[in-house]
Amino acid sequence: MNWIDTHTHTYDPAEGQPKAQALVEKALEAGVYKQILGGVDLHSVAPIMELCRAFPGTVYPTIGLHPTEVRQDYMQALDLLYRHLDADAAQEGNTPYVAVGEIGIDLYQDKTFFHQQQDAFRTQLRWAKERRLPVVLHVRNAFEEAWHILKEEQDGSLRGVFHCYSGSVEQSARVLDLGFLFGIGGVLTFKNAGLPEVVRNVPLDSLVLETDAPWLSPVPFRGKPNDSSTIPIIGHKLADILGITPQEAARATTANALRLFGL
């Protein structure tokens, strides 16, 4: 079975984990034949591109300013990231960016830069429309705030995925109306998680798998550093919840990822 991890930070392993290249090789041995690396800021650009050059056709880059990285100087950060989007991916030996992300709004701990987050979010959504790229959304404790902006910016060309989806079944219907997909990770395996109810109520062709490594390891590895080799665990859990075979889960989620990211 071939699996795809649509959101990982393999380029930045947790303390005690093997180096990034060893983690990619470990995932390949587990049947995870492609990974999408989530960009978060300017500093993540270089290590992402380095890993993509080491594994062409296997590892792919995204670029964006994560909402928790939005500060007073966010306009300067956006300008520098846009220059990379405009130039670096076109350089010889680099893999073109496959998405703008991860971007969005995060009001979980700090609302100090909420207005700046909103502006940065709008700006990067417009990059995606301009470049005809999907977006990878980070939305935490801010569904309504993000939804309002997405509805305003949706002109029929916006597409993407709610990374690490944590909304309700009711909210998932609104995500579908928008034409977006759901990123399903290790939380699916957690006891008392509401995510199983969500996946039962959305079409299989709206689901992609992810790890968000090195975070959110699935059971039985919860609490330990995560890596992309755990994608089959998440895929098997999805299959069990939906009453389908793991092969069907792998085929569907892989096809969804290939379609979304144009791979």
Image (cartoon, grey):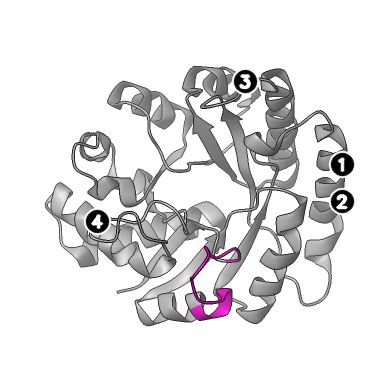
Give the residue pinned by disc 4: 219
| Badge 2 or badge 3: first in the primary sequence | 2
Discs 1/4, front: 4
Q: In the image, is 89 to the left or to the right of 176?
A: right
Q: Is residue 21 magenta?
A: yes
Mark 2 nearby-residue class (10 Å; few <14, some 14–19, many ≥20): few
| Badge 1 or badge 4: first in the primary sequence | 1
Secondary structure of the residue carrying numbered label 4:
loop
| 151 over 8 or under it: above or below | above
Give the residue pinned by disc 3: 111
Question: Disc 3 marks which amino acid?
Answer: Lys
Residue drawn 19% across and 42% down? 191
Estimate the x, y position of residue 2 in percent, counting from the top left: 35, 72
Question: Disc 4 marks which amino acid?
Answer: Val
Give the residue pinned by disc 2: 83
Estimate the x, y position of residue 132 in percent, counting from the top left: 68, 46
| 155 over 203 or under it: above or below | above
Q: Could you say which quadrant of the image residue 117 lies in?
A: top right
Question: Disc 2 marks which amino acid?
Answer: Arg
Q: Are marks 2 and 1 in contact (CB under 8 Å)?
A: yes
Alpha-carbon distance for marks 1 and 3? 23 Å
| Badge 4 or badge 3: first in the primary sequence | 3
Pick whichever, 148 or 118, lies toward us. Answer: 118
Residue 79, numbered circle: 1
Discs 2/4, front: 4
Mark 4 nearby-residue class (10 Å; few <14, some 14–19, many ≥20): some
Question: Disc 1 marks which amino acid?
Answer: Asp
Estimate the x, y position of residue 146 in percent, counting from the top left: 56, 24
Alpha-carbon distance for marks 2 and 1? 6 Å
Secondary structure of the residue carrying numbered label 2:
helix
Secondary structure of the residue carrying numbered label 3:
loop
Residue numbers of the magenta segment: 11-22
